[in-house]
Image (cartoon, grey):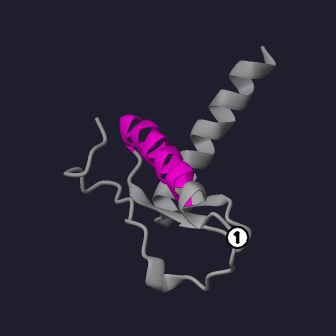
Amino acid sequence: MFGPEDEAFEVEEFDPDAVTWVRGVDYVTGWREAKDAAEQLGEALAGAGVHGRLRAVSAPDGSGVVRLELSVRAAREVAALVDVARLGKAS
């Protein structure tokens, strides 16, 4: 299971000094949603044997964004998994 001690995927903590703040924009909520999604994606990818780096951030409008960094090999593995899932839905 994916957790803070798992080094396969790391989800970075919110860094308030790494953003330009706009009054009235809720950046923390977007980041929290992205962090939850990154953890969910990390669990799924780790379960499939794919290793990479996930980063939860907030976009300028406050929405959450998950950034995924993979090696070339891992990217090809993910592409193959998506192809299999797509073929399964077509049946």
Front position in the image: 81 or 55: 55
Front position in the image: 50 or 21: 21
| Residue located farthest toward the front when viewing the structure as drawn | 24
| Residue located farthest toward the left when viewing the structure as drawn | 5
Type of amino acid under label 1: Gly
Relative to 14, is 89 on the left or the right? right
Question: Tag 1's secondary structure?
Answer: loop
Q: Quadrant of the C terminus?
A: top right
Picture quarter containing residue 15?
bottom left
| Residues shaded magenta | 31-49
Residue 76 colored in magenta in the image:
no
* Up-down relation of residue 26 to residue 38 (above or below): below
On the image, the x and y values in percent for residue 51 come to 38, 53
Relative to 56, is 82 on the left or the right? right
Picture quarter containing residue 25?
bottom right
On the image, the x and y values in percent for residue 76 come to 56, 53
Residue in view at x 49 percent, y 84 percent = 18
Residue in view at x 68 percent, y 60 percent = 63
Residue in view at x 47 percent, y 53 percent = 35
Residue behind mark 1: 24
Relative to 12, is 4 on the left or the right? left
On the image, the x and y values in percent for residue 39 come to 42, 46
On the image, the x and y values in percent for residue 29 come to 57, 55
